Amino acid sequence: MLIPYKIPFKIVKRGRSRLKNLFSALAIAAITAAAAAAAILRTLTFEASPFLLDPFIKRLLILTTVKALKCIKCINTLVKLNSLIAANRSPMTRSASSISLFPLALALAAFIAPVAFAALVALIIVALFALVVALAAFAAAPAVAMTLAKRRAKVKRLLKALIDLLL
C-alpha cells in the first residue's frame, strides 16, 4: 500500500461501536446473562439434549411427581397414626373427626423437610442467576453512562450553537 508523503496514516473507524448504543449494551448484558443461566442449567442436568431446558423441565416434572407421591404417603401415614392413637383413647374422645396434633406434626415435618431442601437448592440457583445478571448489568452500566454523557454534551453544544446562531 502506498502512503503519500507527509500525510498521516489513520485507521478510520466507521459506524458506532456496540457499547455506544444503549440497546446494544442491554442486549449484550441480556445475552451474557442468558448464556450464564444456560451454563448453570447445563451443569445441573445430566442428559445431553439439543433443547437446553428440555432436561431441566423433565427433571422438574419427575421431582414434582415424586413429591406428590410422598405427600400422599404422608397423608396415609397421618391417617394410620391418627387411627392408632385414637384406638388408645377413651371412648369419649375416640371419634373419626378428632385428629391429634402428634401425627399431624409428624406428617408436617415429613412434608416440610424435602420442600425446604428443594427451596434451598432453588434459592441457590436463583441467587447465582441474579448474581450473573447483576454482574452483566454492572459491566454494561459504564458504557451506558458514557453514552448518555456524550449525548448530553452533544445536545448542549448543539443548543449553544443554536443560541449563538439566533443571537
Image (cartoon, rainbow, N blue to C red):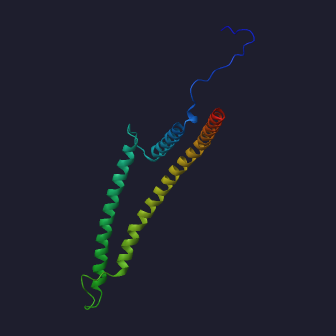
Instruction: Return the residue found at the far front.
Output: 167
Question: Could you say which is closer to the camera, residue 118 or residue 103?
Answer: 118
Q: Position of residue 97 (x, y in %)?
A: 25, 82
33 displayed left or right of 4: left
Q: How many marks?
A: 0
Q: Position of residue 67 (x, y in %)?
A: 35, 60
Residue 19's image quarter? Answer: top right
In the figure, 6 relative to 123: above or below?
Answer: above
Question: Could you say which is closer to the camera, residue 50 or residue 11?
Answer: 11
Task: Identify which residue is drawn at 74% across, 9% down.
Answer: 5
In the figure, 115 relative to 141: above or below?
Answer: below
Assign the C terminus to one quadrant of the image: top right
Question: Could you say which is closer to the camera, residue 125 or residue 83?
Answer: 125
128 displayed left or right of 4: left
Assign the N terminus to one quadrant of the image: top right
In the figure, 123 relative to 141: above or below?
Answer: below
Task: Identify which residue is drawn at 43% across, 46% down.
Answer: 45
Q: Position of residue 60 (x, y in %)?
A: 37, 52
Residue 13's image quarter? Answer: top right
Instruction: Return the residue found at the far right.
Output: 6
Task: Identify which residue is drawn at 67% across, 7% down.
Answer: 2
